[in-house]
Amino acid sequence: MRERAISAVVIAAVVIAVFLAGEPWLTLGIAALALLASLEVFRLLPPAGFPVALLPGAIFAPLAVLATGWLDDAGAWVPLYVALVLIVLAIDAFRRPDVRDGFLVWMGGSFGALYPSLLAFLAGILVVAPAVPEEALLGGYLDAGRTWLLVLVLTVWSFDTFAYLAGRTFKRGRFLNHISPNKTWSGVIGGTVAAVIVGGLLAAAAGQWLPGGLLMGLLVAIAGQAGDVAESMLKRTAGVKDSGHLIPGHGGILDRVDSFLFAAPVVFGYLVIVGS
């Protein structure tokens, strides 16, 4: 417990420092997370049945983050990025003497490159976030990008916190226990209610329409839970409990960002719609 608490304090201090520093450090920090998460994904794929090569696959996720944060009109590059991943990793797989082995390398490597690349939507939020009105409750403190990144983080954390509390308190109904045995419907419902309320109130505090914020909170809850279960599926297939051991007492980086992999695109899409 002491090791876990120390790790949590250190992580929180680093995250807060990078968050307050703003750009370019924030995008660089997200890129570093994407690289570490990508390395963990590529470590999990071989025991899951995909004999992947670490390079060049693991370099794509941080490149996606940097491109999204720093290139003009990065959205126009997304199809090219996906094509580049598939083409480069197909060529790399040609080296395998066994055709089936090469195909598995190509499929696993493409997944390993694209899955952690979803963290690029965190950098995308910094780019597309609409201005927060000065008269709004959250106006005048941070720039728009960091304000909405904070909305995402607090909404996901509220889901995780209240899902844990509700699950421990009521313990009603197993939820996808063939993938994640500890999850319950009571936890999912409790976390979802919390995310809807927190997401809606924070969106309103950032100057947006309350009903739209409530819907965003609901979608973040669904996506965040799906992200957590998807990572559990990968770990169970690989036969491991944690994605890594980088954070003492907490597992790996992927264990900490799994919900954000699916939740960040939801908030990004919401902001694109709001901005248009």
Image: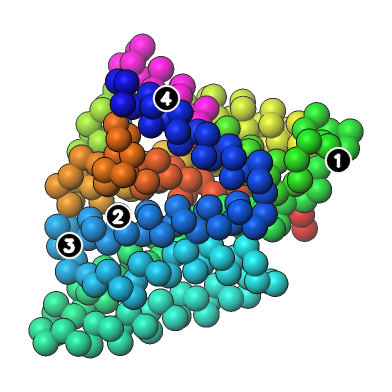
Q: Position of 182 compared to 25: left or right? A: left
Q: Secondary structure at mark 3?
A: loop
> CB of mark 1 within 8 Å of CB of mark 4?
no
Residue 134 higher or lower than 58, as above or below: above
With respect to residue 99, does 29 lie above or below?
above
Residue drawn 33% across and 27% down?
4
**Which numbered tag is attached to residue 133?**
1
Q: Is residue 49 visible to the viewer in this orientation of the structure? A: yes
Q: Which residue is mark 3?
A: 46
Q: What secondary structure predominates along the stretch shown in magenta?
A: helix
Is 166 part of what is drawn in magenta? yes
User: Tag 4 or tag 2, which sits nearer the N-term?
Assistant: 2
Q: Amino acid at mark 1?
A: Pro
Nearest the camera: 167 or 110? Answer: 110
Q: Nearer the viewer, mark 1 or mark 4?
A: 1
Q: Which mark is residue 40?
A: 2
Labels in figure, total: 4
Residue 37 figure quarter: bottom left
- Disc 1 element: loop
| First in residue order: circle 3 vs circle 4 | 3
Q: How is the image coloured?
A: rainbow
The span from disc 3 to disc 4 (Cα, nearest Å) is: 32 Å
Residue at 32% across, 79% down: 89
Which span of residues is magenta-colored?
155-172
